[in-house]
Structure formats: structure tokens, C-alpha cells
Image (cartoon, coloured by chain):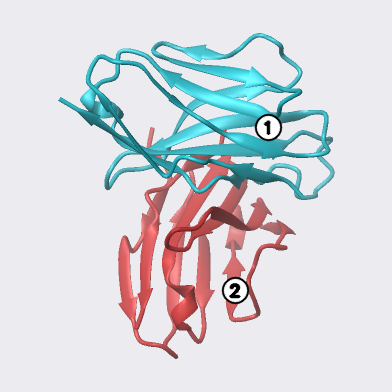
Amino acid sequence: EAGVTQFPSHSVIEKGQTVTLRCDPISGHDNLYWYRRVMGKEIKFLLHFVKESKQDESGMPNNRFLAERTGGTYSTLKVQPAELEDSGVYFCASSFLKGKETQYFGPGTRLLVL
Amino acid sequence: AQTVTQSQPEMSVQEAETVTLSCTYDTSESNYYLFWYKQPPSRQMILVIRQEAYKQQNATENRFSVNFQKAAKSFSLKISDSQLGDTAMYFCAFMKQGRYDGGSNYKLTFGKGTLLTVNP
């Protein structure tokens, strides 16, 4: 069974540019989460999808971040325009619909904004 | 809001020895789950062990076990017979339990992590 995959694995962009991160959850997982780890800090929750619906986006830093999950399958997280403080590792996780189920994480996308 | 504290940024242990990683948390919830995840170098984060707060018995998974002290809000991870492959960043995480009502009940709150190095 394929795990959670994320693309790209690394991205280096300049301040002001746009970057789109992609997450493919495990097949059959309706819950999809985005998290972010800024260097030296905790992994922090960004948002939660159930199928194609945003259930909780309380962790999104500001309106430069836009997440979508069209058709309830893969998800994208777009940062536009990117700022220096957006640098970090962006993790995606998925789980079955019953929320208490284990969240399976992807390898993360390392974003560096110069 | 919940907080999770891992007071040991780095630890090291000799192969075959036992090591304990500490984790404390703060919450007003009475029902919740606690997790330990590990992230080996350049690899995916995987679940090591989970504990339901309503269970008094400490969870165990092979060489990994926890010491869950609910009153003290402590959740330490013990790794017995450490192996080189245990070298990783270990994250303690909290998730509150609740009725699924479309809210944010199932997001994880993480500590900063402990980098464990197992030396040969």
C-alpha cells in the first residue's frame, strides 16, 4: 500500500514568488491534514480537510496561504506571495474518517524562501 | 489550548542500553490520546506508540513502552535494547478526543522534539 506522498521534496524560491505544494493521501483516507515545522520550533497544525471540505483552518498563518482538495483526493497548498518566514518543512498527514485513527505522515516538503 | 513540552532537545545512548525520553503536557481535557512519533534522518515520520488517556495500563510496542502518569500529565517513552536504527527525532503529540462534529477535534499538538542518537 502506498503511503502519503508529497511533492516536491524541496523547493527554493525567492521572496515574492509563488509555490504550490502537493499532497497525495493514502487511498481511502478522508481526513487530510497540513502541518508545518519552522526551524527549531514545534510542528504546528495548519488545516484539516474532511473529503473536499475544510473542517478547520484555524492554523493557517494568513491569507497568503490557500489550501484546496478538489474531489476529496489530493490536496494542494499554495503560498502567494512567499515571505522569508514561510520557510520550513510542510507535512501532510491522512487518516480514516473516524478521527481518532492514526495519522500517517508524508515525508514533508522543505521550503526555503530567500 | 493544549501544550506539549519535551525538555530534552538532544539525547544519546549506547547501543543495547535503555533510554527514556520525557514529555509533559498541559490540558483541561479529560479524554484524549497521546502519541510518540519518530522521524529518522531523511525519512518519513512514523507512529511509534499511542496511549488512550482512559486506559490505566501503559502501552507497549516491542522494545518501546510508555510511562503514562495522568495526574502528573507526564508521558515518557522508554526504549529498551537501543538499536542504531532508533536514531531519529522523536516527537510527543497530543490529540483531544471528542464527538466528531466537523470541528478540529483531531488535530495533533506536538512538542519540539528530542533528537536521539544511538552510538555503536
Q: Position of residue B50 (x, y in %)?
A: 57, 24
| Residue A6 % position (x, y) | 39, 55
Could you tell me which residue is drawn at 33 percent across and 64 percent down? A8
In the image, residue B63 above or below residue B1: above
Which image quadrant for residue B66? top right
In the displayed structure image, the side of residue B34 where residue A16 appears, left or right? left
- Chain containing mark 1: A
Q: Nearer the viewer, residue A66 or B60?
A: B60
Q: Earlier in the sequence, mark 1 or mark 2?
A: 2
Chain in cyan, by letter, is: B
In this picture, residue B104 sits left or right of residue B6: right
Q: Are marks 1 and 2 on the same chain?
A: yes
**Amino acid type at mark 1:** Lys
Q: Residue furthest left?
A: B120
**CB-based contact (under 8 Å), mark 1 and mark 2:** no
The residue under the point 49% across, 24% down is B77
Mark yes or no: residue B22 visible: yes
The quadrant of the rendering that contains the C terminus of chain B is: top left
- Report the residue marked by disc 2: A66
Give me the disc on residue A100.
1
Across and down, in percent, residue B7 comes to: 51, 41
Neighbours of disc 2 within 10 Å: few (<14), some (14-19), many (20+): some
Q: Which chain is red?
A: A
Q: How far apart, in angstroms, are the residues tagged by discs 1 and 2?
A: 26 Å
